[in-house]
Image: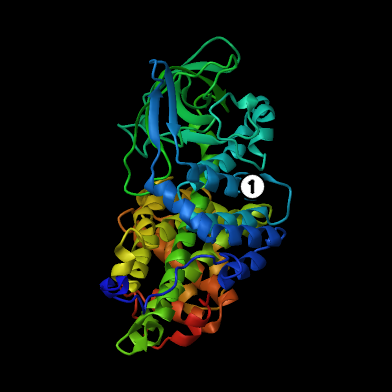
Amino acid sequence: MTSHSSFETHEVFNQPPAFENINLFTSDPILQAAVKREGGGAAWDDLATYGELAGSAHMLHAGRLANEFSPQLKAFTPRGERVDTVEFHPAWHEVMAASMEAGMHCRAFEDTPGRNVDRAAIIYMGYQMEPGHTCPLVMTNAALSVLRHQPELEDVWKPRIMARCYDGADIPAREKASVTIGMGMTEKQGGSDVRANTTRAEPTGSAGEYILTGHKWFLSAPMCDAFFVLAQAPGGLSCFFLPRFLPDDSRNSIHLMRLKSKLGNRSNASTEVEFAGAHGWLVGEEGRGVRTILNMVAYTRFDCAVASAGLMRWGLANAVHHAHHRTAFQKKLIDQPLMKSVLADLTLDMQAAVALSFRLARAFDRPENELNAAFARVMTPAIKYWICKAAPNFTYEAMECLGGGGYVEEGPMAWAFRESPLNAIWEGSGNVMCLDVMRAAHRSPEALDVVLAWLEASGEKRVQDGARAVGQALRGTGEGDLRGTVEHLVYLAAATLLRESAPDAVADAFISTRLNGAFRTTYGYIPGADVAGILATASL
């Protein structure tokens, strides 16, 4: 009789162990250094606790399940009653609970030092655990900046927004322990041009109450408890607050038409909706809706940048992990000169992304400082533009480091690659971000002057020369070369930050390769760089 073992086709060897049960905070020296440098760390123990949870095999598996079993629209009950709900896999609720307990949805508005820096670390790690769930939590955090415009709404909703727990029940907000807040601005005919919106808002006669009729092409996270939307009121485009349940506990007329089938972000529901006489309450003044909602947009753009930086860290960490354990041509991949150059080059962009996004977090924490205020004003759209644009090519290159094992769905990179274009599109596409940088330069020329003075004080001649060229371009009116100008501005800022804080091997290589004006389409070409010194900073 043939033994069972004789039917085994092969023994599995030369495969790296699973990249899991990794503390995403304590294993990341670049993240830890950024938190300390930019004034965070009051929540150091919390960050380590969350990092351990987010990198655990259990939570990474939950993240995979939440993406494999995507949400399902349940517009009606079996009896035909309209309910407009979305059902999620239990894993979705598990990752939501983990991140809400950590304060991803509210920490920026808690009274603790370095709160935006510490919260940035949570987003950075949470995005590696599971990216889709960060969408409603990012919007909930940003919502607090808009509710300030309407104190009577803030008084009712803020306590539940600030609660460090998760309540996913489909019931009126007043019965819940916590709530989440979504937003809907884009319409089919307008996209980023929200002033083209056609949704109408008619006053009811009751204080601040309107009836909204129209549609939204994207309503993010439809199971949130309320939404900020833009609609045309008699006085012009205005901002409104729409709860899912009305004060009498009936459902608001926010009809979910269909769920978007998206390239990535599959765990998170995005919907098309019709407002069939939905009740909304005015936030801010009539006709100043864009100005009101921009408070929220500034936070969500910042969060997009931090999240994409976290995605880059996930890609680099998996690539380095694989290279340390995989042998090819009689040598470990990490000992192959070409592979080392690729990994080192990736490390430069990842370190730049962390330095930029966490410097921005400090600016949000301390806006009373002149440089911080200017940095936030000018650099938020610029940093969002570059990091989110860099993420797809970065993630692809990291996936290639894993070979065929990186391309399969069971591996750690397929979901990351699908996710990577998202943040460059949401909360303002690349062209919109570049135009916002130019708009900031024209409307707040003193802020641009402060940022340029900071760059010129760096002591790096290439940075100083570049700052003068960028300033001249942004003060002009030409838009055709604006992408190159904004990218150059970001590289100058990253070079300055890395020179201040990173090892010389990193700063020298970044400056010599990113500020030389050469066109780059791939990673792995960093002539003369201290490759070993750079890779030492990316250790796990």
**Residue 276: x %, y % from top left:** 40, 17
For the residue marked with disc 1, what is the amino acid?
Glu
Q: Can residue 30 be seen at all in this image of the molecule? A: yes
Residue 456 in view (yes/no): no
Q: What residue is shown at x 44% (from left), y 72% (from top)?
A: 17
Residue 183 as seen in the image, left or right of residue 208: left
Is disc 1 surrounded by few (<14), some (14 to 19) or many (20+) residues within 10 Å? some
Point 38% across, 35% down: residue: 72
User: Where does the image place residue 501, in percent across and percent down from the top left?
Assistant: 59, 75
**Where is 68 relative to 492, above or below?**
above
According to the image, label 1 marks what residue?
101
User: What is the x, y in percent for residue 464?
Assistant: 49, 73
Q: Quick check: 305 above or below 4?
A: above
The image quarter in which residue 147 lies: top right
- Colouring method of the image: rainbow
Q: Quadrant of the N terminus?
A: bottom left
- In the displayed structure, would residue 431 be above or below residue 216? below
Percent across and percent down for residue 437 are 45, 53
Front-most of 41 and 457?
Answer: 41
Query: Quadrant of residue 194 in the image?
Result: top left
- Name the residue located 44 percent from the left edge and 28 percent from the top edge: 85
- SS class, disc 1: helix
Looking at the image, is 231 positioned above or below residue 402?
above
